[in-house]
Amino acid sequence: MSAPSESPDPDGLPTPRRIIAVFALLAAIVLAVLDGSIVNVALPTMAGALDVSPAASIWIVSGYQLALVVSLLPFAALGESIGYRRVFIAGVSLFTLASALCAVAPNLPVLVAARVLQGFGGAATMALLAALLRYTYPHRLLGRAIGWNAMAVALSSATGPTLGAAILHVAPWPWLFAVNIPIGCLVLAAARALPETPGSGRHVDGLSALLNALFFAPLILAVDRLTEAPIWAAGLLLVAAVSLVALVRREAPRAAPLIPLDLLRNGAIRLSVIASVCAFAAQMLAFVGLPFYLQHGLGRDAFTTGLLMTPWPVTVAVAAPFAGRLSERVSTATLCAIGAGCLAAGLGLAAVWPLDGGIAPLIAFNMLSGLGFGFFQTPNNRNMLLSAPKERSGAAGGMQATARLFGQTNGAVITALLFGFVGDAAPRLALAVGAVFALAAGIVSALRRARV
């Protein structure tokens, strides 16, 4: 008797279709993550080609990041309203079209505008990926699905700068964006396999979306100007605070608010969000502090520094799928507490290791940090997603992405402040502060375990 061609599962897609759908989801997130890092290494080249200052060229990165941050929650709400698949496909389409516009941009303003469109497209894919995974995989396999997603993100982050440098070695800068076009078309073809999810039909409030943007955009801009123009930064922070208060007051009475206040009332989700912010702050403190530590403290060149930083994301990529499988059988709170503890230990050891103590232990500490981060991130995301009602999966996914970006922003702000106040001691102190944040993530995760 021949084996059936499909493995039906009422709580997910049949196996052949599931593979195609997962390819679409992971390829889309790889595109969005790569585009957040691949351009960084090319900024000097692009500034010269476009005849603009280095400071002005930063908007090529900032425009993308701002659009991403301000639109995550609105796209999550739109996905719940009209269907996750429709919004996801629209996001990939916009991202691919914007990539083509970036490749032919004749000047900086056009390029920044196209990057903003790219950010909107990337936000639609990031915000809805977790929700689509929940409908693609059966409940019992969701942990490993989230692990594969974490692996894809880690590898994309690790290879982005190297891939950017390789493209620039053989082609001009527009090819950094042109390479997205065929991949985007493949994703759109594969996206036909994604599950059809019913929309709730709820209205997405335009004023709330505007208030959301008026909270996140001034907050990110204030971070960028905090040390150079503190008065301007204070004014932007005031605008952000007023907008947040107005947004919460407007959305609080609603059953499915734009800012998922209903989900945050759930203790398990709330603690997972707090732990996520702490862990991603620790990650960013390390990712900013370590290069300065390696180059200024240990005298390594930029290429060697990149190689020495690689063990972290590679270890995350190895650990995340394993942690995902384990989270299907072991308490996610326990795994998160252990992972955050390893992250804290790795960063703490790196912070106190003497400069003349050799490089091999620092590589080991980096790998311990990556191992801990991988074991924290996947179970924590699984808990955030599965603790939410299935019809609020979009909001849960948007909240995951927002917590990640908020934590990374906080980590960048703290590192900048450390450089402003303590100078040369900042890199090692950033690692120590990162260890404290990681320890806080572990404690919060342990509290979630105690509530069970």
Image (tube, grey):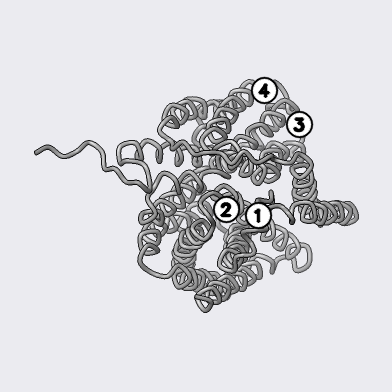
| Quadrant holding the N terminus | top left
Choose top left, top right, bottom left or bottom right for residue 91.
Answer: top right
SS of the residue at dot 1? loop
Choose top left, top right, bottom left or bottom right for residue 429.
Answer: bottom right
Amino acid at dot 4 = Ala
| Residue depicted at 48% across the width and 70% down the height | 333
Q: Could you tell which of marks 4 and 3 lies nearer the N-terminus? A: 3
How far apart, in angstroms, are the residues tagged by discs 1 and 4?
A: 37 Å
Amino acid at dot 3 = Val
| Residue depicted at 51% across the width and 32% down the height | 167
Closer to viewer: mark 2 or mark 3: 2
User: Label 1 neighbourhood size at 10 Å, few (<14), some (14-19), many (20+)?
Assistant: many
Residue 317 is situated, as x and y percent measured from the top left of the image, at 42, 54
SS of the residue at dot 2? helix
Amino acid at dot 2 = Ala
Residue occupied by mark 3: 52
| Residue depicted at 89% across the width and 53% down the height | 235
Residue occupied by mark 1: 260
SS of the residue at dot 4? loop
Foreground pick, 443 / 135: 135
